Image: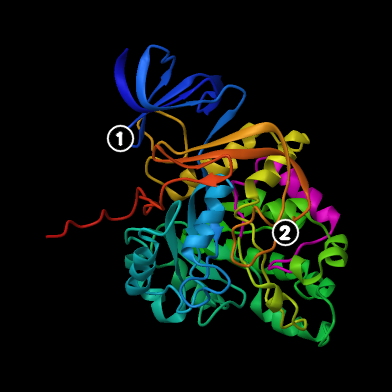
Amino acid sequence: MTAMFDLLLKGGTVFTPNGPVECDVAVSGGRIAALGNFERHAAQAVHELKGLTVLPGVIDSQVHFREPGLEHKEDLESGTRAAALGGVTALFEMPNTNPSTLTAKALNDKLARAEGRAWTDFAFYMGAAEENADKLAELEMLPGCSGVKIFMGSSTGSLLVEDDESLRRVLSSGRRRVAVHAEDEVRLRERLSVIEEGSGSEMHPVWRDVETAVKATKRLLALSRETGRRVHVLHITTGDEVALLAEHKDMVTCEVTPQHLTLSAPECYERLGALAQMNPPIRDAEHREALWEGVRQGVFDVLGSDHAPHTRDEKEGVYPRIPSGMPGVQTLLPLMLDHVNAGRLTLQRLVDMTSAGPQRIFGLAAKGRIARGYDADFTVVDMGRSETISSYWLASKCGWSPFEGMKVKGWPVMTIIRGETVMQDGELLKQPSGQAIRFQETIPPQPTD
């Protein structure tokens, strides 16, 4: 025996930058040491993975974990626990907490809260608002910051940048890619008259219509060109936007969610009611098919869950005062593996949108691919395993999923983060040991005395 490694992954089909390869993966010091045949090599731990598929660790670049301020819905421990059980190794958390993440102090508070409690690696968006617009160039460079998030439609507290002048100020401050929720706030206010107190959630896509999304995206693209700032448009829902974004790929990247690829109106509202209500809304099957065409044509760069939990009690309120959002971080991969098995996309395309895409867009350091020197982050899946998404498996505090009862083919069986096996066969191992994600453009942490 030669060369003692910390961990060996043996016999699996490994998705490398060269495509799927049947090989072993050696890990030392939390990083990938080599790929090859290590039959004659020793390791402190060995996983025999014959018949299984080893993907680069799945990165979910849009989650809402509600801490601080709204921990009854979710917190950093429960949210990352759900993520690890679902095969996710790293994630970016959104700023619409209470208080909102608008300052270095608020960011550092979140980083401190995650220490010793997060099961996955993590980073946090800095929210854009009137009060910090001129400071964002400095704030976005802080360690643990995944970039800046803009809400063009209403959100928590002061997290709203609705007019062009305010958007111009935000886009002119800083250089990292800005993530944007693109719904036009003025149009939303104008269209409130189309809904009535007590009408059902089926009116959600009528109120927040296609033009609400398209108008905001057009405004954003014009200001992106004017300011020279790269933007990332979140949770696209319309075929109109797919066509528009395809014409601006030199400046813009974009995201699609599993729920917008899986659900469609009116069926989802008839079956799920307010549990299907999110922003932007689930739309009809014609728009869903246009999103799939965007996946096939390579328009979408990233797949994000937009995990946004609310309790069942909150979802049983009176529309339009029912909160929008649904959980999704734990079901992201099972849903998409089922779509792979159904022939709607390839596993290589899924890898591109869940690891290589986030790394490329946001500049993650040493993550996003299975290659020598990169962090040893792996999501091991059984492509032939069928399971039913059930409540006992779900870890989110909200306690429900719109996909409960759905049978899927393809299942995460192991989550490995920096060489540590965090989840195996549906069981979490050891203790939470997630770390802040490092980015190529941010300043390194300063040494302490």
Foreground: 337 or 142? 337
Residue that carries the numbered disc 1 in the rendered image = 29
Q: Is any atom of residue 251 visible in this view?
A: no
Image spot of residue 234 (x, y percent): 60, 59
Question: In the image, what residue occupies the spot 70% across and 84% down?
Answer: 189
Question: In the image, what residue occupies the spot 47% across and 58% down?
Answer: 228
Does the stretch in magenta take in 291? yes
Foreground: 243 or 155? 155
Residue type at mark 1 is Gly
* Residues in magenta, as a range: 277-306
Q: Residue furthest left?
A: 449
Does the stretch in magenta take in 415? no
Q: Is any atom of residue 4 visible in this view?
A: yes
Mark 1 vs mark 2, CA separation in Å: 42 Å
Answer with left or right where residue 14 lies relative to residue 140. right
Image spot of residue 245 (x, y percent): 65, 53
Q: Is residue 159 above or below residue 272?
A: below
Residue type at mark 2 is Thr
In the image, which disc is placed on residue 237? 2
Foreground: 219 or 145? 145
Question: In the image, what residue occupies the spot 30% across and 22% down?
Answer: 4
* Tag 2 secondary structure: loop
Q: Is residue 349 above or below residue 105?
A: above
Q: Quadrant of residue 310?
A: bottom right
Q: How is the image coloured?
A: rainbow
Image spot of residue 126 (x, y percent): 43, 67
